[in-house]
Image (spheres, rainbow, N blue to C red):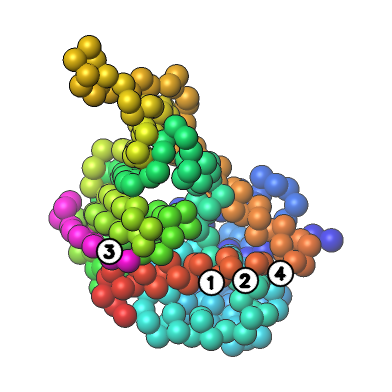
Amino acid sequence: MVIKLGIIGYKNHAERLGDIINAMKKYEVKFYHPTKKKKNITNNFQDLLKLDAVIISSPNSTHYGYIKKLVKNNYLGYIFCEKPPAINKIQLSYLKKLNKNIKTKIFFNFNYRFSNFNKILKENLNSKKIGKINYVNIISSHGLAFKKKYSNSWRSNGKNNLYNILETVSIHYVDLAILNFGNIEKNYNSSKLISKNGSSFDSSTLILNHKNGITTTIFNSYATPLINELMIIGTNGYLVIRNDKLKIFSPRNVFDKKGFFISPVGSKSKIFSMNKDYEGSLKKSMEFFLSCVKNNKKIPINEFETSIQTNELILKMTQKM
């Protein structure tokens, strides 16, 4: 029996998801868009209700509307929705009140949960080489805001998508920080429009103070050269990913002849591409979802609940609660 999937959206990330699914050669894919007239695109929403699963990969402001429309039409299949689940308190409240049976058929794509990046954070949380972690710094940015197509895209529209980079990129790293380092006690957000292209913020700096004493800083931007870096600093050493290479510097107690501290000796570099890891984690995220669809298996409720928790924190940062 062929499993039939619908993708809401028709280009960019929707195409990327379609390519991942088509490469598996096990599924029949149909795209939906309310107005676009193209091959393999339906404009009839009712067509989606006949499918085994619907994948929502449309602009952020439309995610909630499509979920609500599917639920109100008594859709019985599975829903894969890109983050964020909601863009305001009212929408988030509606999602929280959904029946548990519906929640266990909805998967919000925080795909870094399936990444090697996530494994590195977990492995080094209590490692002897790093010691007790007290600071984590994440930088992930590139120059999308300077591309010609950006100014006319939904991402740059401040009216519907003011916090842009925060809701599209930073939310992934906030999710990882909460999963690995626990609840946030205090947070600070500085979002800016640096490129002057469009009317939504293209850059953000977050400071997260976790209740366990760890501080996470996250910088994301569409207005810089390509940068992907991670630094984890602990009491006995530190880990760095930079220029697609991972290196650990340890132990702390290394001295010169006068007894002054000197830099720890670095380990042999390992190849680690954060771009490739993103692509790999996206594939694993989709594979996880489709395995639930294929086996008619409930999606663990904690996947839904942690997604809502992350979304709630992002909304508080943007003061849209």
The residue singled out by tag 1 in the image is 305
Q: How much space separates mark 3 and mark 1, taking CA atoms?
A: 21 Å
Magenta region, residue range: 185-196
Q: Amino acid at mark 2?
A: Ile
The residue singled out by tag 4 in the image is 298
Q: Quadrant of the C terminus?
A: bottom left
| Marks 3 and 4, the one that precedes in the sequence | 3
Q: Is residue 261 left or right of residue 229?
A: left
Q: Position of residue 154 (x, y in %)?
A: 33, 64
Residue 53 picture quarter: bottom right
| Labelled pair 3, 4 in contact (Cβ < 8 Å) | no
Between 312 and 161, the residue placed more toward the observer is 312
- Residue 187's disc is 3
| Labelled pair 2, 1 in contact (Cβ < 8 Å) | yes
| Marks 3 and 1, the one that precedes in the sequence | 3
Q: Amino acid at mark 4?
A: Lys
Q: Residue furthest front?
A: 259
Give SS at disc 1: helix
| Labelled pair 2, 4 in contact (Cβ < 8 Å) | yes
Q: How much space separates mark 3 and mark 4, taking CA atoms?
A: 34 Å
Give SS at disc 3: strand
